[in-house]
Amino acid sequence: MKHLILGTAGHVDHGKTSLIRALTGFDCDTHKEEQTRGITIHLGFTHIKFDDNHQVGIIDVPGHKDFVNTMIAGASGIDFVMLVIAADSGIMPQTIEHVKIMQLLQIKSGFIVLTKTDLVDEDLLELAISEIEEFVEGTFLENCSIIKVSNRTGIGLAEVKKEVISQIDKTDERELGVIFRMYIDRIFTSEGHGTIVNGSVLSGMLRKDNNVTVLPINRSLRIRGMQKFHQEVDEVKAGDRASLNIVGMKRGEFQRGMLITNHLRESNNMIDCVLENYSNKKLKLWTTVIFLCGTFKSKAKIHLIDCDELEANQQAMIQITLDNPGFFYYNDKYILRDTSNDYTIGGGSIIDAYPLKHRKRPKELLDKLDKLASKELKYVLLNEIEKSIDIVDSKELSYKLNFSEETIQTIAQSISNEIAIINQDMSQLYILMQDLTEIHKEILKIIKHHFVNNSLSHQGLSVSEIAKYMISTQKKLTKSSLKIILDNMVQSQSLKIIDETYLLFDHDPGSNQALKDIQQSILQDINSAELDIPENHTKEIYKNKYSLKNQELNSVLNSLIETNQIIFYDGCYLSKATLEKLLSMMKEKFGEQEFRIAEFRDLIDKNRKIALYFLELFDKMGITLRHDDFRVITNKKMI
């Protein structure tokens, strides 16, 4: 069975609620004020079931001009419409406004019911039909069925039911999406059950045993029960009218316009949209408006992006800044009204729910927005990948856009010439090809620069070391993302990995035999020096002795340090073997006993300056522990 919602539309007192009552036996005007005044003020809800394959929820909207905001809230959740026009009144202001609002909300199908036909003669009836046909030309209702009805006598009701069945058969269910979303449009309490909230499920699926989050207050709540068509059910999905019995909040804490969801995301007060100016007024570069999306409502400012003024019945790209942040997704529909709530300005769809702020209007931006407005999903995906400061995975994009992960991966494959696809576990990672090329260049540059002074090294740079030097690319990669890219470069044989460090794939430290011979000579010099004055073993001395360039000498010395053969301390190079021999002498002489500098000086038979130099080195290494004038040997081993 399809999950669909039928909505009414039309001018006040044209018989929408009476028609629903005649079709279903249920009066949607349940509030005392509505019954007293004889007009619909609040949204009304019911359903009709014809057979096991044809059942539909029904939303009855108010037709009075003072309640257009309520009408918009109801119309935002419907799949097809029943436009009601009274034969004795014809097309009226709210008839026109309701049809335009449904156009802006991109409702695709529906039919027209001509009520009160028992109050007019055949000539007026034919005139009304002719007027209606002309009125709906160019709209989604062009060439739709027009059914003549009398709610009082019952004439035409059977035809209406047949048309509802036909609409159910030909109307597609809305895309399910991965995220459950339901704006609250009704809140009440039921004795023995507690708080119940109603709404139209915009996307996703929710099961009875799931927890939900109420946004924007970020409260996690438990579902005690759920109903659809006044029947207890175990799940509801996109296209259903749902009643949720929720535990964890009092009735007074809920507000109309809150969002029930199973996915927590950050709110946002800025969105990029396509706007159609429905009003007969020209819009300026900046205009203050009332923004409506579902039952969400906020004051907002619109900024025209691709023009300085927007004429009536023209379209523009706009950026909307909301006073109250909300939770929106790509292709959500919205309506704008003037701040006095006197008339509808226009509306359209959201093309970027989390855009960057547009201070300028370069051609590149306008081109990108035009592509997003085209509804081709490849441009939507490219935009999200481009905006991300890190590589982004298909799961994350699935939740950002409310597309299934399979859809994301299919779209990604179609643009594989523009994005790099990295398979990772059960998902995929994406980055623009041009960004990845720049990152590769930066990584190779960093590693090459490192080996200018480390050509004899058998090790390269760690992920953390490479991350420290990544400054020139636009992306701000996390270390985990950088490692994925580095490992991918290893797979493509641009790099190789040794001891968790990354080197150029063709790096060969043994290829320069002449430099390796000098390295052995320098190591022999340092080892043979033993406990000589350390100042005799500086870089400058070796540079002059062997006539080496700075880069060559750095490679020699850094390689010896890397392989743990020498130690650099206080500008001098010391033999690791000599230090180990010295430590062995100290342990044999002092054991666990405290000793003074003088005792150590006598042990090595050198002057106080040299003795102090070695002890301070051991202090720094943690080999010795100083207390006042005494030191003691620790259990720490020399690395």
Image (cartoon, helix red, strand yellow):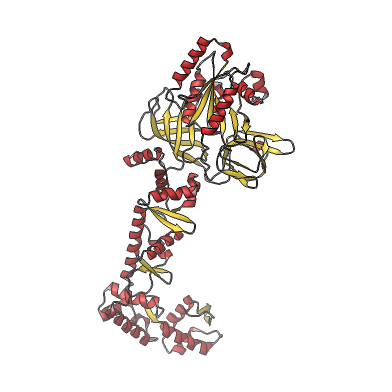
The answer to whether 531 is drawn above or below residue 83 in the figure is: below
Horizontal and vertical percent position of residue 453: 32, 71
Q: Quadrant of residue 77?
A: top right
Q: Quadrant of residue 237?
A: top right
Q: Residue at x 45, y 60 (%)?
A: 479
Q: Is residue 50 left or right of residue 338?
A: right
Q: Quadrant of residue 166?
A: top right
What is the number of callouts on the image?
0
Q: Is residue 406 left or right of residue 192?
A: left
Q: Nearer the viewer, residue 553 or 534?
A: 553
Q: Residue at x 44, y 50 (%)?
A: 409
Horizontal and vertical percent position of residue 131: 46, 16
Observer able to see residue 569: no
Q: Is residue 290 left or right of residue 222?
A: left
Q: Nearer the viewer, residue 263 or 10?
A: 10
Residue at the extreme right: 192
Horizontal and vertical percent position of residue 28: 64, 26
The answer to whether 295 is drawn above or below residue 538 in the figure is: above
Observer able to see residue 71: yes
The answer to whether 483 is drawn above or below residue 356 in the figure is: below
Horizontal and vertical percent position of residue 84: 55, 21
Q: Nearer the viewer, residue 362 or 138?
A: 138
Q: Quadrant of the N terminus?
A: top right
